[in-house]
Each structure stands twice: as C-alpha cells, then as structure tokens.
Image (cartoon, rainbow, N blue to C red):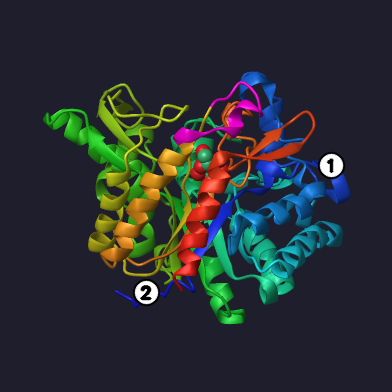
Amino acid sequence: MKEQGNFKEFLWGVSTSSYQIEGAAAEDGRTPCIWDLHCRIPGNILNGDTGETACDHYHRYREDVALMKELGVNSYRFSISWSRIYPQRGVYNEKGMRFYKNLIYELKANGILPCVTIYHWDLPQWVQELGGWDARETVDLYLEYADTLFRELDADVNMWITHNEPYCSGFLGNHMGEHAPGIRSLQKAIRSTHHILLSHGRAVQLYHEKYGTHPIGITLNLGVMYPQTDTVKDQLAQKMADGYTNRWFLDALFQKQYPADMLALFAARCAADFDFIQKGDLECIGEPMDFLGINHYSSTTVSYLSAAPNLYTAAVTGKEKNAIGWDIDPDAFYDLLVRLRKEYTDIPVYITENGFASKDASAQEAVHDPQRIRYLEQYLQAVEKMNAHGLGIYGYFVWSLMDNFEWPSGYAMRFGLVSVDYQTQERVKKDSFLYYQKYIAGKMAKI
Ligand code: GCO
C-alpha cells in the first residue's frame, strides 16, 4: 500500500457536472450535446425536464463558489462541457474556455482546489452524428479535446479525471437506452465502452508524456451486489451483475483483460466477435494511472431472470432506502474497498461521489433533511473506518453541492446540500450543509 496522505492533504469536497448545473445551453457558442436531444424526446425524462437552464450556474458560479467557501471544502469536482470547447469539428471556442478559466480563477482565489472531470456524459451532438462512442474515431476527437484542456488549464488544475462512470455512458446509454443517446444495442454498447476506456488510456499516456504535473485517473461507479438467495441461479445473477457493472471495467483497467464470463455472455447475446479490440488496446487501457475515483451510493440485491439482458434483475430488500429506492448500506461501502485492495490495486482512491436523494414537494421543504444527514454520518463513518484500516482513501466528495438535473429523474430527485428553487434560482443552505460544514471543520482542526 502506498503511504497515505496526512489530513492536510485529504480532500474534502463536493461534486457536480456540467450538464446537470450549468444551463446556458446556447450561450457563447455552445452547441447541443446528446443530452439536449435526449431530453426533447417525450417520455425520456420525468415531467419533460431538460438541462437548458438547470441551476443557471454558468451565470451564478461566483455565488456558488461563495457557498463552497462557506461550506469549508478544500476541493471542488466539476466537469467541462465538450461542446463549449469544440462546438464543431476542429473549431476551438475561446469563449467557452473563458468560462472555465473564470471559474477556476474564482475557486483558487477562495482557496479551493479544482478537480476536473473531462467527460461527464455530455458528448457533443456533432460527435454523435459521426458515430459517437461506437466509432473508434471518437477516441481521437476526445484526445484532441483533452489535450486542449491540459494545455489551457493544467497550470491551475489540481487533478484530472478522464471519464465519469463509463458504465453509464457506455452501457446505460447504448445498451439499456436509459441515458443519452438512448440506443439499445448490446453490440454498440460493448464497442462504446471499449472506445471510452481506450480514450482514457490514451489520455493518461498523453498527459504523462506531455504534462505529468498533476495526478490523473478515472472515476468508476462501483456497486456491491448481493444474491437474493443462495441458490445457484441467484449466485449466477450476482456474478453477472458484478461483471456488468464492476469487473468489466476493473479487469480491463487493472488486469488488461475483459472478464471471460462476460465475454461469453455477450457473445451469446449478440453474436459479437470483438474484432474491434485491436492489438495493443488493452495494454493502453491498462496504462498505470495515479489514482482511482469511486462513486458509490448503495448496494444492490439481485435475483436470476433468464429473460433479462444480463440474466439478473434487482430484488426488493427490507433495507432502508433513498427516494430513488437505492438501499442504504454503509457496511457494503467498506467491504467494497476491502475487495478493491485485495483483488485489484493499491493506488490512491478518492471517493468522488457519495450522497442521498430525496423527493421533496418544494425547495423550501427540501431544507430540513435529517435523512441526508443520517446517510452522510453513516457513510463518513465508513470512510473513517477505511482509513483507520489503511485502505488508502485520499479524499471524499459529496454529491452534490446543490440540487440539480438528475438525468431521467429530471428535477424530481434532489441530491444537494443546498436547495435550489428552479423558478427563482434562489439557493438555500440545507441542514445537511451545516452538518457537513461542521464535520469538515472538525477534521481540519485536527491537523
Ligand atoms: C452518477 C453521476 C451523477 C449523478 C449521481 C446521482 O453517479 O450517476 O456521476 O451525475 O447525478 O450519481 O445519480
């Protein structure tokens, strides 16, 4: 295990992403991303919500940074909108970049370290029209975009995340069709995840060769899967759920191979021949990175269902849940890290997202949130236990700074420490904001 940083270096933060908060969809040269189009198709998003205005962060970022300053975080994780930087093929948009330079300037002036996610699902529509992640050429387009970010922003960025949750952008977007671009094709989805992972590996190589001043890694959403019963069938379901969400990505990144059981399942389900995996690809995907980001929210219990795409379906448990129905299970969070250390890697880990969804009737009602506080208490305790047992956690980011556009759930689900009234854009600190503020202050005081 690499030596763990002291508390001075520990990052206490909050996370957001571009499409979920920025709004200003057509401003300063930005062109549509795949989510802009996905939101316009009736039935895709609850209540027909879109990210067109979202939290209007593009115009209110100073106010939002002031909230972070008050919260006391020493780091902020956000993502960059690719179509602000490259609104069209080969056309660099200085005005789009200016927004991020201003944001980073504001953060640094307030003593907050910028942690930048290069890609958090908002693929420019023009890239989708060239084939999207299904096309190998997208890897080169991503690299051109990433290199531009490194060149323009590296001096002031504290750490880089190549991708957020390739499971979602790859499988949920292209196999399940639940996320943009809303495609339902296993074959396309396998190719897409491969190209996403390849673009990650190539970006890590490029960054290490040309820049290499700050840490660079990827963020995975790792879940913990339990079988509903101990029957052979449910155990198989558990294995497939783990393979689809966790091992497909972990094995590629840390063992330079895809899991054999998933290759067999996919081959049977869509007659894929995997010829898109070219010589040297897995070597590149496995390029050593400086840290792993983990987004974690809950555990999932599954049972066998032969008709389901991957032979499993989520089962209902008696565990306490958030408003989306995700099980609250902090012990599973701890076990996840034990497993990661045992089976995969000893590189530093950042918890890049963790948080609680509530469904409140109004922004005002959202302000008193004892359940979110209870959730954070339990999950922060798990992080403390991880570090007490030397599991190498270097930072923790709450999802999210403020209520925002929660993908297919639109604005119905609220994850924020700050409540947002979407009519007036008024921000109000929730009780959980005050809780996290006090928690961080206690940690900092111990330095
Ligand atoms: C994710 C994304 C976030 C979500 C959050 C809650 O993990 O899905 O990174 O954009 O909003 O996780 O679902």
> Which residues make up the magenta segment?
359-371
Residue 201 lies, with reference to residue 434, above or below; the image says below
Asked which quadrant contains residue 105, the reply is bottom right
Q: Position of residue 99 (x, y in %)?
A: 80, 58
Residue 368 lies, with reference to residue 22, above or below; the image says above
Asked which quadrant contains residue 56, the reply is top right
Amino acid beneath label 1: Ala
Which residue is more in the foreground, 260 or 391? 391
Q: Residue at x 32, y 39 (%)?
A: 329
Question: What SS does tag 1 mark?
Answer: loop
Q: Residue at x 32, y 48 (%)?
A: 333
Q: Examine the rendering and report whether any part of residue 186 can be seen.
A: yes
- For marks 2 and 1, give the CA distance: 44 Å
Q: Is residue 155 inside the magenta stretch?
A: no
Which residue is more in the foreground, 71 or 276? 71
Question: What SS does tag 2 mark?
Answer: loop
Q: Position of residue 239 (x, y in %)?
A: 24, 40
Amino acid beneath label 2: Gln
Q: Residue at x 47, y 27 (%)?
A: 323
> Horizontally, is 135 left or right of 22 in the view?
left
Q: What residue would you read off at disc 2?
A: 4
Q: Number of marks in the image?
A: 2
Q: Position of residue 414 (x, y in %)?
A: 58, 33
Q: What residue would you read off at disc 1?
A: 26
Task: For the residues labelled 2 and 1, say whether their Cβ atoms are less than 8 Å apart.
Answer: no
